[in-house]
Amino acid sequence: MATSEGVLKVLSGAAPRLLSSDLGSSNSDLALYSKCHFKSVKNKGSRYFKSLKCSSMIRCHIGSYNYRRLVGGFDRNAAINRLRLLGCKCQQADHGSGVGMDEGNGARFVDNANESNLSGSMNSQKKLEFEDSERLKREKEMLASAGTGTTTFYKSGIDSIEDEAWSLLRDSMVYYCGSPIGTIAANDPTDSGVLNYDQVFIRDFIPSGIALLLKGEYDIVKNFILHTLQLQSWEKTMDCHSPGQGLMPASFKVRSAPLDGDDSATVEVLDPDFGEAAIGRVAPVDSGLWWIILLRAYGKCSGDLSLQDRIDVQTGIRMILRLCLADGFDMFPTLLVTDGSCMIDRRMGIHGHPLEIQSLFFSALLSAREMLTPEDGSDELTRALNNRLIALSFHIREYYWIDLVKVNEIYRYKTEEYSFDAVNKFNIYPDQISPWLVEWMPHKGGYLIGNLQPAHMDFRFFSLGNFWAIVSGLATTNQSHAILDLIEAKWADLVAEMPFKICYPALEGREWQIITGCDPKNTPWSYHNAGSWPTLLWQLTVACIKMNRPEIAAKAVAVAEKRISSDKWPEYYDTKKARFIGKQARLFQTWSIAGFLVAKLLLADPNAAKMLTTEEDSELFNAFSSLVCGNPRRKRGPKTYIV
């Protein structure tokens, strides 16, 4: 064990934290998961582990990011020096010095996603030298293009918007030990203010991963799943305080670090950010949920179910579930989270129980239940999962849903009701109904509100939460159709000249000052404050296909096609009608590119959307019906409902 811990320190710069034993985790889990950073080689009677060092002279390159600053005024020699700095001179791990395990324990151990690296390392240097020469050739073309004042810097042989998008997506790929591992957030060569847009974000990679799965390129998604799993539960702290075990990072970056005792050699390491360096210092709640959803999509699309059956992957799923299902002070079945813990990662008044997290939570629970393998001591976790699914679906469908009838009901609420059969359970005051809602709510259609807390209903329409409630089956069939009806009725507000509004309406005036803290980036109708985000196209498309209404998504994609390429694939758009490119929007934003590609691919092959959707579970439906039909304003019922 001491040997394995020493190797881990070389690889990561920090020893991983031990797992906790809550919710039935066993000592075998601790022993097995601590070895998830190693490659196992099955050799008849024993298994051997090797560290995940990359082979000698394999170069770490990040697509066209290597010439990011050329057009911004840096010379060519600077770009070449940068390429040399990214070179990795790691030593190949010793095959014969692994850590052995007895066969008798019946455990299955990890095998590296990049088995081809072992047999193909001899050719890696020549291959990558050729890629570098091709890249330098493209740099010359870029410099020539910049000198003539043209705005295009990609090769002129692009036949369509889709071809351009694929070229841009591939240029954004990040490589670790010679293999693709993800895509950077943005790849604008004219932008010198990189910040953290040169990192691989888990939530940002999801549309990239789905697009590549649809193209049959499975390796990069598999690599991403396994390597982000290695980053789970690192010893990261904020003011000497560590986040919960099972937390997935918001992002990571490939870095070169010197080997101990040899200044001339380097090793590639993955450096994760759990929020301790992010704006606002908020840990991401959605990363682990998206990871589970992508894992299921990989199995559905590739047919390779062996990945999700691996012991390290199963342990990773259970750790995320234990973190999310842990008991706390909250009475509600929804996840209690802080502002900035999801796609809206700045202060926007979504603290509490935001719909986006609840929709992803429900989807991840269903996906995990489908993928979990039975093992000793897992009954308690399974019961907790099933109980939460039933309670969560009832809570969201019953209390988050509004349409014109429900708004009128809230308008006539009595307050200060005390009893188990109260109608106004959360003590909502009718004066909370904003004038905009009275005028905006159509006669046909409805949606799930953005948040619910005691004496507070956030009536804003949040797109991702509503889309994913349809995709996951959190919304009922009737509610799902009503959400799409509302989108059609309010097309001019939610789509306008570029889909899709992240939320509606914007916070303005004094409300904006108080709720956002006068955030200069989240000014009204910009960024998270009702800005328009092209990446939301793919979630809209999956939702529309599931409800057999793909024409809505096709119409939105047609709107985006008119501008998105000529506007250089911005991160977001500003103004009520999305007429302007966002004032601080990055260009060539990867998830804008990937979201467009996924939408096009799914519209061409709607059947492929099944890898993301889940149908309404019959057991959940029966449980929900029994709760509602007995008494819509039910009195105090059984403490639990176990499937």
Image: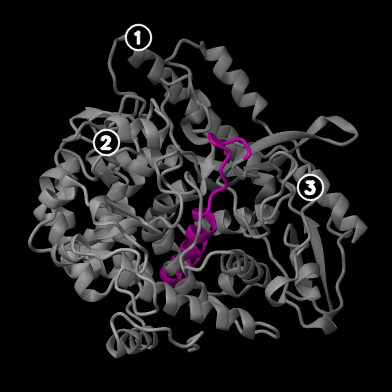
Mark 2: amino acid: Ile
How many discs appear? 3
- Dot 2 corresponds to which residue? 158
- Judging from the image, the colouring scheme is one colour
Mark 1: amino acid: Gly
Query: Could you tell me which secondary element the residue under label 3 belongs to?
Result: loop
- Percent across and percent down for residue 501 are 25, 44
User: 479 left or right of 97?
Assistant: left
- Dot 3 corresponds to which residue? 92
Secondary structure mostly taken by the magenta-highlighted segment of the chain:
helix
Task: Classify residue 212 by image quadrant.
Answer: bottom left
Q: Earlier in the sequence, mark 3 or mark 2?
A: 3
Magenta highlight on residue 277: yes
Which quadrant of the figure contains the N terminus? Answer: bottom right
Query: Could you tell me which secondary element the residue under label 2 belongs to?
Result: loop
- Dot 1 corresponds to which residue? 147
Residue 551: which numbered mark, if any? none
Any part of residue 474 in sight: yes
User: 448 left or right of 92?
Assistant: left
- Percent across and percent down for residue 357 are 43, 58
Residue in front for this viewpoint, 276 or 80: 276
Q: Which segment is the magenta one?
A: 276-302
Circle 1 Cα neighbour tier, 10 Å, few/some/many (<14 / 14–19 / ≥20): few
Residue at 55% over, 46% down: 250
Residue at 24% over, 34% down: 565
Magenta highlight on residue 7: no
User: Does residue 52 sit above or below 630 in this rendering?
Assistant: above
User: 384 left or right of 100?
Assistant: left
Residue at 51% over, 10% down: 75
Mark 3: amino acid: Gln
